[in-house]
């Protein structure tokens, strides 16, 4: 059973471009979470999704950031008009049920904004 | 409010010694208490968890103890090895808010 997959692993964008991060949860998992981690810091919750629904986006900036988890295909975290402050590692996690279960993390996407 | 603290923030031990990391939280309704290990350049991975109906759980060299009254739970690593060097995060599930809040992390260094 493959683990959580994220791609790309590394992404370089210039200021003003769009970044699109993909996450394929573990097979059978319908709950997906996105986190951001700055160097030497902890994990900051961004958004929690179930298939086709955003359950909690309280940690996501209101502008430029969006997330989706379509019926078919991976979950996508989209950052429009990136700025240098968006440079971070973005982790996706999935779980089979709700939040009071183990979360299985992907390897992360490291975004660098030039 | 939602508040999770870890102590200490950094910990350095000699190989073979024990390490203890404490996590305090503020939601008395929390019912799920996991610890994650994050190695450099990788995503976090669950190493042990405990639910509110149990006071202690052990898995080989790793144990977790829970004190619901005092609202803290601790990670215990015995006979530490260099490969235990990593950042450890607690992530209690806040039932009242239906959120998982990650602690700020504890950087553990095991000196050979």
Image (cartoon, rainbow, N blue to C red):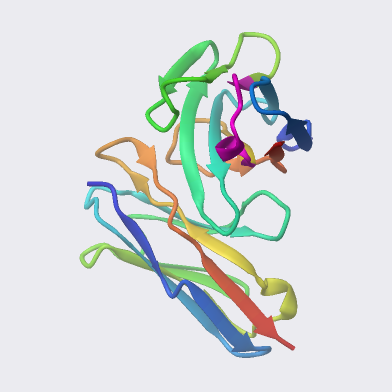
Q: Nearer the viewer, residue A35 or A51?
A: A35
Q: Nearer the viewer, residue A39 or B3?
A: A39
- Would you say A108 lies left or right of B77 here? right
Does B2 sit above or below residue B81? above
Q: Quadrant of the C terminus of chain B?
A: bottom right
Q: Residue at x 37, y 29 (%)?
A: A58
Residue A94 percent location from the top left of the image: 59, 33
Residue B110 showing in the rendered view: yes
Does A40 sit above or below residue B78? above
Does A88 sit above or below residue B38? above
Magenta residues? A76-88
Q: Residue at x 60, y 87 (%)?
A: B13
Residue B59 percent location from the top left of the image: 59, 68
Q: Residue at x 74, y 38 (%)?
A: A3
Whether A114 is among the magenta residues is no
Number of numbered discs: 0
Residue B5 percent location from the top left of the image: 36, 62
- Would you say B55 lies left or right of A33 here? left
Residue A1 showing in the rendered view: no
Q: Residue at x 64, y 22 (%)?
A: A16
Residue A34 percent location from the top left of the image: 55, 33
């Amino acid at each position: 059973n493959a683990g959580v997959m994220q791609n790309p692993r590394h992404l370089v964008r210039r200021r003003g471009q769009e970044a699109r991060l993909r996450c394929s949860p573990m097979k059978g998992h319908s709950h997906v979470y996105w986190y951001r981690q700055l160097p030497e810091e902890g994990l900051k919750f961004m958004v929690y999704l179930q298939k086709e629904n955003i359950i909690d986006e309280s940690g996501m900036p209101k502008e430029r950031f969006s997330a989706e988890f379509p019926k078919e295909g991976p979950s996508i975290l989209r950052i429009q008009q990136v700025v240098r402050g968006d440079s971070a590692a973005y982790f996706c996690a999935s779980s089979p049920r709700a939040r009071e279960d183990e979360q299985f993390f992907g390897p992360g996407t490291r975004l660098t904004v030039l | 409010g939602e508040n999770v603290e870890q102590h200490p923030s950094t910990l350095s031990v000699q190989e073979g010694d024990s390490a203890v990391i404490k996590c305090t939280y503020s939601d008395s309704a929390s019912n799920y208490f996991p610890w994650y290990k994050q190695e450099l350049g990788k995503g976090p991975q669950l190493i042990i968890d405990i639910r509110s109906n149990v006071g202690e759980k052990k898995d080989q060299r790793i144990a977790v103890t829970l004190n619901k009254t005092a609202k803290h739970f601790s990670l215990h690593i015995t006979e530490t090895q260099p490969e235990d060097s990593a950042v450890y995060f607690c992530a209690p599930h806040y039932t009242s808010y239906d959120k998982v809040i990650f602690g700020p992390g504890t950087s553990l260094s095991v000196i050979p």
